[in-house]
Image (tube, grey):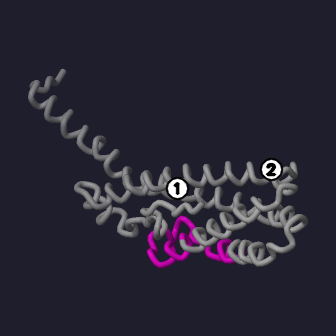
Amino acid sequence: MFKLPRLQVVLAAVMLSLPLAGCGAINAVPTMEQQAKAAWSEVQNQYQRRADLIPNLVETVKGYAQQEQETLTQVIEARAKATQVQVDASTVTDPAKFKQFQDAQNNLSGALSRLLVSVERYPDLKSNQNFLALQSQLEGTENRIAVARRDYIEAVRVFNTEITTIPGAWIAKILYPSSKPMETFAATTGSDRPPSVKF
């Protein structure tokens, strides 16, 4: 039987383990990209949930607050614009499209806030079980949106870091040239200032 010297066995083991160790690094880029895209899908899912609740909310408010027609119209228009702007997982690398999506969602959030503030003037509406259920679902959805956005931001941070640092940048450039840094959410303009409160 042929016996290899101990040093050759060790060297052979090291040489065989290098490609196996590299598999994790090689697969890191597409794995992280898919995780970020999955997180983006959850963001879209929660925004869609909010968009689906709005027609019922508007109809409920309409029955009680006819004089709020302008606010209701703003919510309906903002919802229409928000659902028209589509950014899927393949286009989150486009800053202009991403900003357009974020702006449309921010406009819808603002219109909903104005609607819910105007509802304060209608005690009958505030005690309506249908309205209370919709309001509760909407609040829960806003919380889910915040969590989904946070998870997406973290997944994008991990992915963008991987494809812009060594060795991930080299691996991405050679094996995954289509991998581009993804966009993430920015704070709404004016969110760094506390709201003014007047009594």
In the rendered structure, which segment of residues is drawn in magenta? 80-102
Question: Where in the figure is residue 193, as x and y percent of width and height?
Answer: 44, 63
Q: Is residue 30 left or right of residue 130?
A: left
Amino acid type, label 1: Arg
Disc 1 is placed on an element classified as helix
Is residue 32 or residue 39 the one in the foreground?
39
The 10 Å Cα crowd at callout 1, few under 14, some 14 to 19, many 20 or more, is: many
Q: Earlier in the sequence, mark 2 or mark 1?
A: 2
Q: In the drawing, does residue 57 fall left or right of residue 8?
A: right
Please say if 51 is above or below 157. below
Please give left or right for residue 138 compared with residue 89 in the image: right
Residue most toward the top?
1
List the single residue furthest toward the front.
Answer: 199
Residue bearing the label numbered 2:
132
Query: In the shown orientation, is residue 10 left or right of residue 33?
Result: left
Of 75 and 79, which appears nearest the observer?
Answer: 75
- Report if residue 165 lies within the magenta region: no
* Amino acid type, mark 2: Leu
Query: Main SS type for the magenta part?
Result: helix
Q: Position of residue 198 (x, y in %)?
A: 57, 63
Q: Nearer the viewer, residue 69 or 51?
A: 69
Q: In the image, is residue 40 above or below residue 81?
A: above
Q: Name the residue at 67% across, 48% down.
A: 140
Instruction: Quarter of the image for the N terminus: give it.
Output: top left
Query: Residue at position x 81%, y 66% from top?
Result: 58
Q: Quadrant of residue 9?
A: top left
- Residue 149 - label: 1
Crowding near the residue tagged with mark 2, few <14, some 14–19, many ≥20 C-alpha atoms within 10 Å: some
For image coordinates 83% across by 62% down, the residue present is 56
Residue 30 is situated, as x and y percent measured from the top left of the image, at: 42, 56
